[in-house]
Image (cartoon, rainbow, N blue to C red):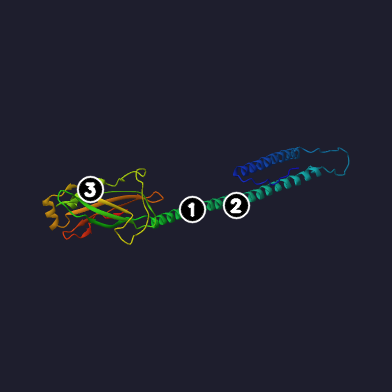
């Protein structure tokens, strides 16, 4: 007796294919067996039936059987054959239907899972980006800002260099660490041009590596701009002559002072302050049109 059972649905398309092939092979074997029995039956039906002929001298007609009678076994076998074929076809149809729908559900679930994973990855990336941006905004808000609070020249004298006192403070919210600065004073007819060349020569490279700079300037604005934590004096390379002193007394832009300060915050971010001031003939101090910036 042939029976068909629905197998456990695996979660892989290969298992589904193997089950369908197994059922197809079983049905093929069943059909082959039934066809062989049916062929034998048809061959036996085509054979000439035995006919009894009597040569009796009588006027009574003799009944002659010209068609074979199907036995009960053959009739039962035909019913069983049809039933088995019907059961097999119905089983395959139901199996294929349920297997196909389960396979579709499995694919849909896999797509939904992948979609959830992708959404989670996007959310994680967005959260990480938001945290990074928030950290950058916080660092910018808390960064140190070094700038001058007072710059003025010392009294001029013949056969002396030109000196500029520089006071600067940290206007930011966090300490300026590994702070290092340099500066120069230029005087004469081309003082501004000399300042431009000085900045061009420095370029954008740091003044020193973090290991060689060790200055620290905490935040805070003093009440007196000339009483600061940090103070330095810039000087010129050349010495004043009488002619130089006479020229400075009647010309603007004749004395220019230029400091540069590099520093870092606690997170290791690099910053720079470039300052350029000049003196009028009256003695007033003003900032140059260029070379005044905080990076």
- Whether residue 262 is visible to the viewer of this picture, yes or no, is yes
For the N terminus, the image quarter is top right
First along the sequence among labels 2 and 1: 2
- Give the image location of residue 36, x and y in percent: 71, 38
How many circles with numbers are drawn on the protein?
3
- Give the image location of residue 55, x and y in percent: 86, 37
Nearest to the eye among marks 1 and 3: give it: 3
Give the structural element (helix, strand or loop) at label 2: helix
First along the sequence among labels 2 and 3: 2
- The residue under label 1 is 122
Rounded to the nearest angstrom, the CA distance separating label 1 from label 3 is 50 Å
Query: Which image quadrant is residue 18 in?
Result: top right
Nearest to the eye among marks 2 and 3: give it: 3
Q: Is residue 50 above or below residue 295?
A: above
Q: Identify the disc placed on residue 2.
A: none
- The residue under label 2 is 105
- Whether residue 71 is visible to the viewer of this picture, yes or no, is no
| Pointer 2 with pointer 1, Cβ within 8 A | no
Label 3 crowding class (10 Å Cα cut-off): few <14, some 14-19, many 20+?
Answer: some
Rounded to the nearest angstrom, the CA distance separating label 2 from label 1 is 25 Å
Describe residue 39's horizontal placement relative to residue 229 as left or right: right
Q: Closer to the camera, 199 or 85?
A: 199
Describe residue 24's horizontal placement relative to residue 276 as left or right: right
Give the structural element (helix, strand or loop) at label 1: helix
What residue is drawn where x is 68% and y is 42%? 27
Rounded to the nearest angstrom, the CA distance separating label 2 from label 3 is 74 Å
Q: Identify the disc placed on residue 198.
A: 3
């Amino acid at each position: 007796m042939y029976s068909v059972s629905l197998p456990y649905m695996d979660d892989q398309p290969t298992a589904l294919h193997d089950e369908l092939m197994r059922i197809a092979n079983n049905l093929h074997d069943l059909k082959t067996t039934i066809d062989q029995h049916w062929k034998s039956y048809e061959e036996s039906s085509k054979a000439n039936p035995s006919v009894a002929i009597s040569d009796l001298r009588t006027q009574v007609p003799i009944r002659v059987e010209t068609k074979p009678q199907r036995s009960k076994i053959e009739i039962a076998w035909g019913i069983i054959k049809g039933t088995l074929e019907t059961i097999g076809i119905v089983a395959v149809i139901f199996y294929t239907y349920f297997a196909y729908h389960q396979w579709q559900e499995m694919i849909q679930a896999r797509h939904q899972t992948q979609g959830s994973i992708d959404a989670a990855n996007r959310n994680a990336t967005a959260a990480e980006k938001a945290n990074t941006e928030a950290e950058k905004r916080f660092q910018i808000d808390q960064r140190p800002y070094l700038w001058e609070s007072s710059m003025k020249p010392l009294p001029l004298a013949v056969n002396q260099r030109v000196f500029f006192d520089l006071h600067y403070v940290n206007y930011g919210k966090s300490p300026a660490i590994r702070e290092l600065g340099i500066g120069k004073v230029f005087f004469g007819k081309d003082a501004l041009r000399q300042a431009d060349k000085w900045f061009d020569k420095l370029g954008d490279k740091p003044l020193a590596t973090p290991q060689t700079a060790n200055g620290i300037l905490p935040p805070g604005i003093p009440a007196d701009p000339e009483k600061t934590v940090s103070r330095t004096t810039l000087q010129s390379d050349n010495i004043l002559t009488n002619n130089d002193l006479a020229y400075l007394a009647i010309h603007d832009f004749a004395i220019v002072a230029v400091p540069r300060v590099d520093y870092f915050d606690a997170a290791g971010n690099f910053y720079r302050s470039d300052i350029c001031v000049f003196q009028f003939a009256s003695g007033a101090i003003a900032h140059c049109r260029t070379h005044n910036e905080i990076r």
